[in-house]
Image: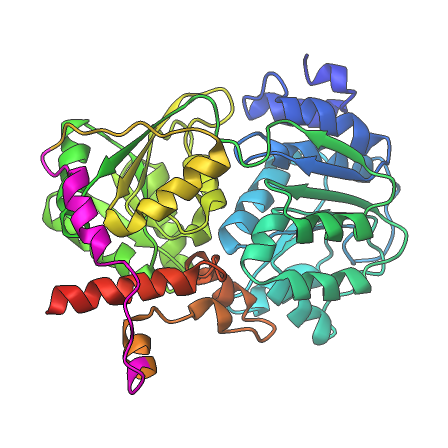
Amino acid sequence: MTFQELQLSDTILRALEQEGYTNPTPIQQKAIPVVLQGRDLLGCAQTGTGKTAAFALPILQLLSQQPRNKSTAPRALVLTPTRELALQIEENFTAYGKHTGLKVCVIFGGVSQQAQVNALRGGVDVLIATPGRLLDFIGQGLLSLAQLQFFVLDEADRMLDMGFIHDIKKIIKILPAKKQTLFFSATMPVQIAGLADSLLQNPVKVEVAPVSSTAEKIEQSVYMVAKNDKPSLLVHLLKELAITRTLVFARTKHGSDKIARHLNKAGVKAEAIHGNKSQNARQRALTNFKNGELTVLVATDIVARGIDVDDLSHVINFDLPEVPETYVHRIGRTGRAQKTGIALSFCDAEERINLRDIHKVTAQQIPVQHEHPFAQSDAEAATIALTLQPVKQPQRGGRQQQRQHQRPKQHQQQRAHGHGQQQGANAGHGESAKRRPQQQQQRQRSQQVSNN
């Protein structure tokens, strides 16, 4: 199938040709006709499938076919969880709509709002926003959604993970009753399914990959390694495999900074990107990475959905995520669309429970690479695992001692409007509220034994 067969306008087709697009992806083939027909849509597709174009192209076409009015209020709203993803979507809308004359604007927190306010006052057809900044502007009377015709909720499951669900519900109440709604989610947990049911009117469901599946063209492997040996193993693999550009995912912001420093000391050009970095620093790091000036970009899960890099051959999980679905999102940065990719994961003794959960969710066993200088045997891991067995905690002082070993629950902070993106910056660390207490106790006991 070609884009011409999807009944797209000449102005859209010309932009696609200039961007090097030749054939639509499966999600685009299925979704574009539905949107052009004016139907609500429920899209379940993993990252890297081309879903941004699946909603951007038909929205741009429908808007460009309407007569102009004097209102400066947006006619289309795309709501997305992170700054990086918002910028990427804005870039795509601008590229696809370059010949339509439509105005595209993006707003997000973490930066001064004045430039964004000025852009809105100049009039906007398509607005891409993160939840906190959108509610901020509405609360200040800087933005009206009264003229809205199209509403896109992108990465809905990620919104839930990052604690934005209540903000989303507030925004939905503000939207006009009459509108076309497009709802996209890589996974469909119960809460997200319920939200979709309440928001969509007789939707067409489009699904192009099984829920919680990993891309077929990604070659996955796991390295059993002691926690202290992970930095050395990373340097070894980067040089041994002659990797020229890779994303390395870490669990914490502090950890990502530490990894980047270690790599630079070892002669590997690396930068860390996370929520504590300024917007300019994050954009500079992304640009350097895309231009090939960096070998490694170390990231927390905040950017798992927001980095779009062509021909990314490798993704490395320095820390295994506590939420299995996050693993799927991470490795989706490579092997995008029809390309192949390689995902390498490090697993220490404490993370083996995470690995088992990933196996369950993805319904596959990730091959273990035993041949490397820092391999941890099953016997060694079993010895460490013995320290993770339940032990009786002292009643006096136990709670205080436990708090000393627990990681701060950063994802519960910064809930005020306008700070939603700061909350999102920490969300990758708090996505497993139900499973975290058990793992925190395990880490505490391991620490107690190692200190004896």
Please identify the quarter of the rendering in which residue 407 is found: bottom left
Q: Is residue 179 left or right of residue 182?
A: right
Please identify the quarter of the rendering in which residue 91 is found: top right
Quarter placement of the N terminus: top right
Vertically, is 153 above or below 407? Answer: above
Residue 187 place in picture, x, y as percent = 60, 41
Residue 355 visible somewhere in the drawing: yes
Q: Is residue 376 left or right of residue 351?
A: left
Quarter placement of the C terminus: bottom left
Q: Residue at the location (19% across, 34% down)?
A: 238
Front residue of 408/146: it is 408
Q: Is residue 334 left or right of residue 434?
A: left
Residue 360 place in picture, x, y as percent = 47, 37
Please identify the quarter of the rendering in which residue 56 is found: top right
Q: Which residues are magenta?
A: 373-398
Vertically, is 151 above or below 328? Answer: below
Residue 118 visible somewhere in the drawing: no
Q: Residue at the location (23% across, 36% down)?
A: 223
Front residue of 244/125: it is 244
Q: Is residue 431 left or right of residue 346?
A: right
